[in-house]
Image: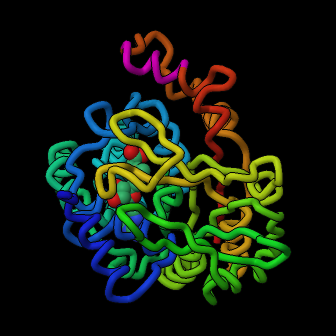
Amino acid sequence: MMFNSVKKEILKEIKEKGDISFRRYMDLCLYHPKYGYYTRIKKLGREGDFFTSAHLGSILGKVIARVALEYFDNGTPHIVELGAGEGLLAKDVLDFFARENMEIYSKTTFHIVERNESIYREIDRNLKEHSLKFVLYKDLEDLPEIEKAFVFSNEFFDAFPVHIVSKKKGMLVELFVSYKDGTYVKRYKIPSKEVLKEIEELNIEVCENCEFEINSDIEKIYKLLSGRFTSFKMVTIDYGYGQEELYNPDRNRGTLMGYYKHRAYENVFQYEGEMDITSHVNFDALIHYGKKFGVESVYFKNQRQFLLDNGLFEVLKEGEELSLKDSFQLKTLLLPDSMGDVFKVLVQQK
Ligand SMILES: C[S@@+](CC[C@H](N)C(=O)[O-])C[C@H]1O[C@@H](n2cnc3c(N)ncnc32)[C@H](O)[C@@H]1O
């Protein structure tokens, strides 16, 4: 049987090293340096496997820009976007700055952190009018030291590879992946030290036969941001819950999902490297690790409320007609049970 390249790499690693953790499986599927989903993808959106609020129109970007502009009433603005994808929100933010305050715009530097180099051409294309205003970094580690920064992200934390934990006969276990007779086999084993540390530090309760995802990368992100920036405001937009709701026995199969050509799949052991795999964010983990590094959480509400609380109606200028795209986005962000409900916004400050 012919396998695609990521699957070949996964099977090679299992053969050489034995069973791999689910986190490693997901990491290879999404971020294998050559064949990973996010390493190859050149464009998200309707032609891709999923789209985000950024693809729907410019309103979300304008509201983020308004919050950022307020933060920089004086000084030199440094904006940092984590996991910027094609740079659509970056464009909306910079367009807004240029239109509302040319003096501030001229002093602004926009720092884009995006791991996927295949998408840089699309970033350059979307930001061609702002080509002198932005700097691209592949890694968070590459960010410079900054006195005062406005940091934001949309669907960044949900794109991290996660561990899967469960409890079997009262014993805490972690999911490992093996391969036998032509199929993947799930193996539950003693959890890795990263998992045990997260469970203890975040006080996570795992119920019998539940499967919960744990992102063990959050602490190092806050440590890094807090080390680089003397002061900052951080707006995180993503789907997820507080811990009690996320790790609730009613949600006992967790939140892991695969997206392939705009269809959702519970089985993520297929379309390796061609399917996006994501899970909901544990916002309590962001709050906890923020606090650990001196970053206070000051606001946590759904996206609809965030837009209303932060000048949605002011950015929709009186007398200015909405484009068809923006009116569709408005509907998607404001109607009950829409993206505006599902997505949460956490604002933190140091
Ligand atoms: C779900 S996409 C969201 C893209 C964009 N923010 C939007 O709203 O359309 C997640 C993005 O985060 C990027 N990413 C994931 N992990 C990253 C990391 N550690 N550093 C920088 N970028 C990362 C991925 O390459 C991808 O472009």
Left or right relative to 31: residue 235: right
Whether 325 is among the magenta residues is yes
The residue positioned 65% from the left and 50% from the top of the image is 240
- Range of the magenta residues? 324-331
Depth check, front residue: 329 or 118? 118
Choose between 254 and 69: the one closer to the eye. Answer: 254
**Direction from residue 277 to residue 296 in the image, left or right:** right
Q: Is residue 135 visible?
A: no
Work out whether residue 168 can be spotted. yes
Q: How far across and how far down the image is residue 312, in percent?
A: 58, 29
Up-down relation of residue 175 to residue 67 (above or below): below
Q: Residue at x 37, y 80 (%)?
A: 14
Q: Quadrant of the C terminus?
A: bottom right
Q: Is residue 124 above or below residue 195?
A: above
Asked which quadrant contains residue 100, the reply is top left
258 on left or right of 97: right
Compare residues 28 and 288 and report the one nearer the observer.
Answer: 28
**Within the image, what quadrant is residue 307 found in?**
top right
What is the chief secondary structure element of the magenta stretch?
Answer: helix
Image quarter where the N terminus lies is: bottom left
Q: Is residue 247 left or right of residue 36?
A: right
Question: How far across and down, in percent of the image, does residue 55 sit?
Answer: 37, 34
Residue 205 or residue 67, whichever sits in front: 205
